[in-house]
Amino acid sequence: MNEQSTDPADSELLASRNGLLSVRVCAIMLILYALYYARSLAIPVVTAVVLYLTLRPIIRHARRIGIPSAVSAAGIIVGIALTLGLGTYLVIEPAKATIAEAPQHLGVVKEKLSFITDRLKEVDKATEELAEAEEESTGGSQEEQPVPVEIKQPTWTSGWSYLSGTGNLVSFLTICIAMLYFLLANGDSLLRSIMHSLPDFTARRKLVEVIQKVQEGLGSYLAKISTINACLGLSVGIAMWGLGMPSPVLWGAMAFAFNFIPILGAIAGGAIVFVVALVSFEATYYAFLVAATFLTLTSLEGQFITPAILGRSMSMSPVLVFLSIVVWGWMWGVMGVFLSVPMLIAARMACEGYEGLGPLAMILGAEVPESKSASASGRGGSDSTADNPPAPQTYLNIVQPSVAGSENQ
């Protein structure tokens, strides 16, 4: 009797769990489709939000010394524009010359790599002969073939069209710069409004802690990785100059930019350097030497320098990093590739802030809080607030209306 009475309850509980899982999966798929469909708007907005969370400490520090948020935000925008303009000026002419000469050197590349392409042609020829022999053995019957139907999926190159057209590039820059300025100048007012909409103090404190954690994580990661990439770009530029490569500044800038893309950036940079060296020098082995030098520098940076500087607090699974690059690159193209790792870090930091999302944070690479869990097991729930107090200065800067009013003035 007891078993018969509990079976309907268990089946109902299982059905409710399955239904909740199905709803969550459908919601995630709909969100991803919406982000893909609205990528022309989502990409500049997400870029602006990532930059805002990274640069927000500068705005807060400027406010403490009496500089209004609007003035410091304008200064940051001008600084970013000057940096990008100077970098573009230094590499635009060598890049134009290299791209313009690429079709002329295609025959040279084929000729020097003939020892590889000839063997591949032999393999293709042998495969075709085997296929013909198999057809002859079956009698050579020709059956009516079905009409092939091709479903075109979004490719990696779809993201290039988003940034290649003049109108699209202007639209991206306009939305991103305007959104970043308003976030830097008035972002705390928006956060304050969100705080007041939450039901209680605990929810407000938790949101402040999560924002602070994401801000610190993104700021620390981007600051350290930018410094590392700048040193790598300088090292690559000096090495390419020493090896006699044309336009060493271009290859240093390429190494700096490509290294923001883990794994794939180094591979793509090594391939480009190899092809350019192949058409720039007579000896084929020298191209392998140049590519090996580039890959050695990037490997030393990726395997030793970056882990030592970032530490375990920023370590993530290479599988998840690669999957994030592929997924966001497939959805948003080139900008998705560059934004994939910062978004993965932000997601991990946000999940660490909520206990219910702790398992997901551990999957994304968070450390298991052994000391915290051990200390919490020896105390009651009344000490939970003392274990994890709110950041008082951050909370006052965002929530208190008096401070907010003085800051806006």
Image (tube, rainbow, N blue to C red):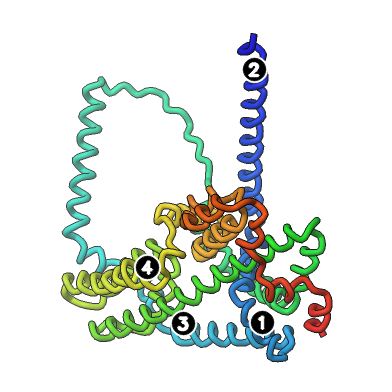
For label 3, the residue is 92
Q: Amino acid at mark 4?
A: Pro
Q: Is 153 rendered above or below residue 280?
A: above
Q: Position of residue 260 (x, y in %)?
A: 45, 69
Discs 1, 3 touching: Cβ within 8 Å: no
Tell me what residue is drawn at x 18 percent, y 74 percent: 286
Q: Residue furthest top?
A: 1
State how far apart marks 1 and 3 are (Cα).
32 Å
Q: Amino acid at mark 1?
A: Ile
Sequence-wise, which precedes: disc 2 or disc 4?
Answer: 2
Q: Is residue 365 left or right of residue 19?
A: left
For label 2, the residue is 6
Q: Quadrant of the C terminus?
A: bottom right
State how far apart marks 3 and 4 are (Cα).
32 Å
State how far apart marks 1 and 2 are (Cα).
60 Å
Q: Quadrant of the N terminus?
A: top right
